[in-house]
Amino acid sequence: MNIQNAPQPLGVGFTWQPDVKESLGEGANFLDFYEISPDVLCRETVAQGRRRLAYQPSLLRAAVDAANQLPLVIHGLGLSIGSANGWNEEYVAILDEFHQQQSFHWHSDHLAFLLTTTVDGDELHTGVPLPMPFTEAALDILVPRAIAMNERFKVPFLLENLTYYLPDLPNDHGWDEIAFLNELTRQSGCGLLLDLYNFHCNAVNFGFDALEALKRLRLESVIEIHLAGGAVHDGFLTDIHTREVPEPVWQILEWIAPRAPNLAGIVYEVMEPAVPRLGPETLTRQLERVRQVWDKYCRPVCAGGTYAAR
């Protein structure tokens, strides 16, 4: 990604959810922006016998009011950009409606395709993302769609690396995940939402050194970073956002933050049901630590986005 196309830095973010400020307590004071999923602003309806997700403008208004004038970025759940038969047009329509009502600094989705099922004759996305193979054929699908998404809203479009649990994903040219991400960003001009916890999961589950692998990544493509914590299930470290960020992920963040020249935001992700269990004190400690990293490496010293430490 050309640096001229990179967004202005925002800082520290958190997943938007109802009553988020009350849930975070003092932690809300460390936030610069919220990350919101348009999918959560929808409700399932049945029209002419067809099930569909219907965008609810009132839910967006409530979210914008709750954000208290903080900037918003978009993180979609349902684009299914890698589906062979086309992305999820229903999600794109939802995003179009959202954009008509509210601007956003950048938007992102998962580097994945979604499983589908048929209900009463309608094909529905199940919300289960599956990873793309590291192949030329996958790039042929992804690159033109990523370019189209970059152009559609005139703000940067990012793709997020996924956790995967199947070994030996198909690959061309001996590509691993890093090589594939480099090709994708080089050919499409899209940015990366680098989920450090997802990458940590893959490293633990498949026995490679996460930091050594990330040293080969085109770091100029990293626009946003996700942090999260999960749990072990059936021997696999899983991508569920229900815990504090593990220490190895913090160590990777400390390495990558000063080396990613276009980094514009770091988001701590927590699933809504886990927020009460973690509690405001724990969430505040986590957000304060994110703030410390941001202020140490990434805080812009002028409106033009020049960084204090790079």
Image: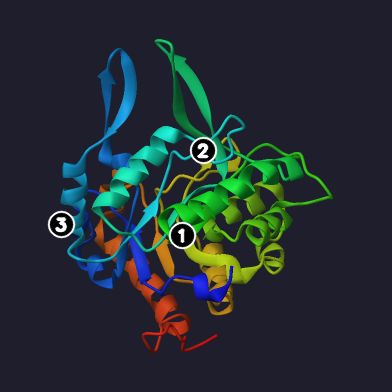
Residue type, label 1: Leu
Residue 14 in the image: above or below residue 233: below
Image quarter of the N terminus: bottom right
Q: Is residue 302 above or below residue 205?
A: below
Quarter of the C terminus within the rendering: bottom right
How far, Cα to Cα, is label 3 from label 2? 29 Å
Q: Which mark is residue 80?
A: 2
Q: Which residue is identified by label 1?
A: 227
N-term mark: 3 or 2: 3
In the rendered structure, which amino acid carries the disc numbered 2? Ser
Q: Position of residue 58 (x, y in %)?
A: 16, 43
In this rendering, would 233 be left or right of 57? right
The front one of 249 and 171 is 171
Count residues near mark 2 (Cα–Cα under 10 Å), then give few for <14, some for 14-19, many for 20+: many
Sequence-first disc among 2 and 1: 2
Q: Is residue 53 left or right of residue 140?
A: left
Q: Mark 3 sits on what residue? A: 65
Query: Looking at the image, which residue is at 29% across and 68% down?
Result: 31
Point out the frontmost of discs 2 and 1: 2
